[in-house]
Image (cartoon, grey):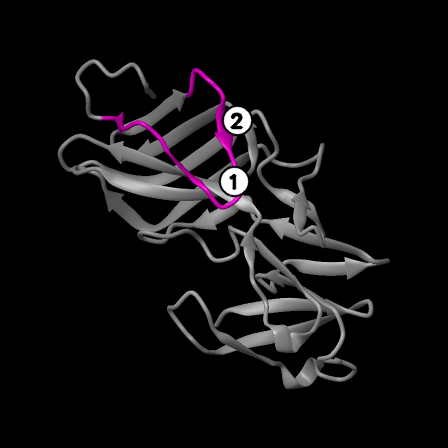
Amino acid sequence: DDEIAVIQDSKIYKFVLYEGHGTNSGMFKLAEEESEGFDATKELKAFYPYSGVSLSSEKITYVVPISQQYMENSFAIGASPMAAVADNAQDGLHFINLFGAVKIQMKGAEGETISKLVIGSNNILAGMATLSDGPAITMPTDDAASNITLNFATPINITQTVEFLVPIPEGNHILAFVATTNNGAYYKRTTSLKTVTSGNIIKMPLIDLGAENSKTRFN
């Protein structure tokens, strides 16, 4: 169900994936209801995912969701925007990631389950961002969230170490994590800046919630 937004001549066109599911390349076709006026020979800008992209007075914006759904060994749909620029449709599109990501390793006590994970930063992490054909993304500077909430359809057992992958904007971050489990809530904060760059993943040290005399827990 992947869809990309292609912008040409001050209009957004929706393209839908029809070949290449589950691979790193694919073929997209123009949605029939939005096909009028598209010219495959002209320069185009493309952004993924289609949902959340808007265009007003030549300004392209994308809403980075503050609330995201956990996906095993991956991240929520729409959480990691990508962009591409091409001279024409025949040349194909090479998308680049506009965000980096943090990989959070977490382990709890025997039988402990996690139902919510909040990631905070000294920088803005969500809200209405501006897209440009650099391609680049510029996060809002105020009136926006400096945290992201990772929700779980059902609580996840963390008796053994579980990894959570969360895309965030590039930059220097002081990160904080609040985990809500069936044993209470826990807070952990990094003591140094973590540099996140687009397209790269930073693996965080293990957060052991079940450690004896853990100082991260609060009720």
Left or right of residue 95: residue 42: right
In this rendering, position of residue 208 left or right of residue 138: left
Tell me which segment is drawn in magenta: 190-209
Compared to residue 75, the image places residue 170 above or below, namely above
Q: Residue at x 43, y 43 (%)?
A: 166
Circle 1/circle 2 CB separation < 8 Å:
yes
Task: Name the residue carrying label 2.
Answer: 173
- Tell me the CA gap for discs 1 and 2: 10 Å
Q: Nearer the viewer, residue 26 or 34?
A: 26
Helix, strand or loop status at disc 1? strand
User: Callout 1: few (<14), some (14-19), or many (20+) C-alpha neighbours within 10 Å?
Assistant: many
In the rendered image, residue 120, in percent from the top left (x then y), is placed at: 50, 30
Q: Is residue 208 above or below residue 114?
A: above
| Rendered location of residue 211, percent (x, y) | 19, 21
Q: State yes or no: residue 80 in magenta.
A: no
Dot 1 amino acid type: Ile
Task: Identify the residue at horizontal 64%, vertical 43% (top origin).
Answer: 127
Q: Which mark is residue 168?
A: 1
From the viewer's side, name the closer residue of 199 and 176: 199
Badge 2 crowding class, 10 Å Cα cut-off, few under 14, some 14 to 19, many 20 or more, is some
Name the amino acid type tagged 2: His
